[in-house]
Image (cartoon, rainbow, N blue to C red):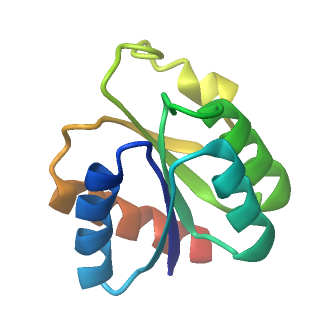
Amino acid sequence: MNVLIVESSKDLAAVWRRHLERMGAVVYTADTQDTATDLLHEIPFSVIVLDLVLEEGSALAVADFASYRQPETQVIFVTNTSFFSDGSIFQHCANACAYLPSATSPSDLATMVEHYAQAAEG
């Protein structure tokens, strides 16, 4: 399974990456909208772990592009803010499958990624 992590904090992305790689995932990271969309042009992903607040670019633009380019790809949104805490992210992004705090344990996040990757891969 190919997983894309889109996270401005390289340290946090590295922690998540290590957990996912231990589960056998092939993990790519991007810290900007442009890098994420470039990767979406080149590589098919089962799941995207996407920080809702990026330092450069828009997470919603990444999710929208993924929905167009790779409609089967599931997006797990993570955030350390209260944006969309009412669950409305699921109304805005058809490919959203989960909404989690950034502080979710890396092993729990990896388990969710594995679950949604299996669903995306059929």
Q: Viewed as shown, does residue 61 lie left or right of 23?
A: right
Q: Quadrant of residue 16?
A: bottom left
Near-viewer residue (81 or 100): 81
Q: Which residue in the rendered view is the most extreme toward the bottom?
A: 24
Q: Position of residue 76 (x, y in %)?
A: 46, 47
96 relative to 117, above or below: above
Whether residue 122 is visible, yes or no, is no
Whether residue 107 is visible, yes or no, is yes
Q: Viewed as shown, does residue 60 lie left or right of 38?
A: left
Tally of numbered tags: 0
Residue depicted at x 31% and y 80%: 21
Q: Position of residue 42 (x, y in %)?
A: 76, 75
Q: Position of residue 104 (x, y in %)?
A: 20, 43
Residue depicted at x 39% and y 63%: 113
Residue depicted at x 28% and y 37%: 102
75 relative to 103, above or below: below
Near-viewer residue (40 or 10): 10
Q: Position of residue 57 (x, y in %)?
A: 65, 33
